[in-house]
């Protein structure tokens, strides 16, 4: 099972924790307040995971429909086909 983000309000201030079960025991990891770098990095990670999942889903739908996909990778545009072939086109002037 995955980790859950939990918020506790103490004296009007919000503090965040990750909560999960491991070996039948409840574990927590303190992330800090909203300004905490650790909390912010966790949020960026969550956004990245969601973006990756949306990309995987869109990629599967395109391949199931027989279409190729195109995406940016560094300074290039990549066109990927269902058979795994990838074409790299350098972007210039963009």
Image (spheres, helix red, strand yellow):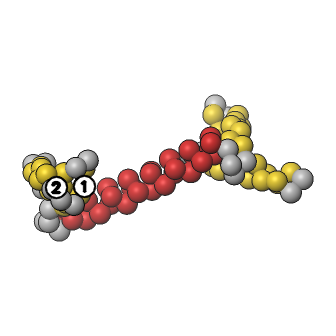
* First-in-chain label (1 vs 2): 1
Which dot, 1 or 2, sits closer to the camera?
Answer: 2
Q: Nearer the viewer, residue 42 or 64?
A: 42
Left or right of 59? Residue 52 is: right
Task: Locate the N terminus by quadrant.
Answer: top right
Task: Locate the C terminus by quadrant.
Answer: bottom left
Residue that protrudes farthest toward the front in the picture: 93
Q: What residue is drawn where x is 49% and y is 55%?
A: 47
Residue wearing tag 1: 72
Left or right of 8? Residue 82 is: left
Real-space Cα separation, disc 1 to disc 2, in angstroms: 9 Å
* Secondary structure found at label 2: loop
Residue wearing tag 2: 91
Is residue 51 visible in the rendered structure shown here? yes
Residue that protrudes farthest toward the bottom in the picture: 65
Q: Decide: marks 1, 2 in contact (CB < 8 A)? A: yes
């Amino acid at each position: 099972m995955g980790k859950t983000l939990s918020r506790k309000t103490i004296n009007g201030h919000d503090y965040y924790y990750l909560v999960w079960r491991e070996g039948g025991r409840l574990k927590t990891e303190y992330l800090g307040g909203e300004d905490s770098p650790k909390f912010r990095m966790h949020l960026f990670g969550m956004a990245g995971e969601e973006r990756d999942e949306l990309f995987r889903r869109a990629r599967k739908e395109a391949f199931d429909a027989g279409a190729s996909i195109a995406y940016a990778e560094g300074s290039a545009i990549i066109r990927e086909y269902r058979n795994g072939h990838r074409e790299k086109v350098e972007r210039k002037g963009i």
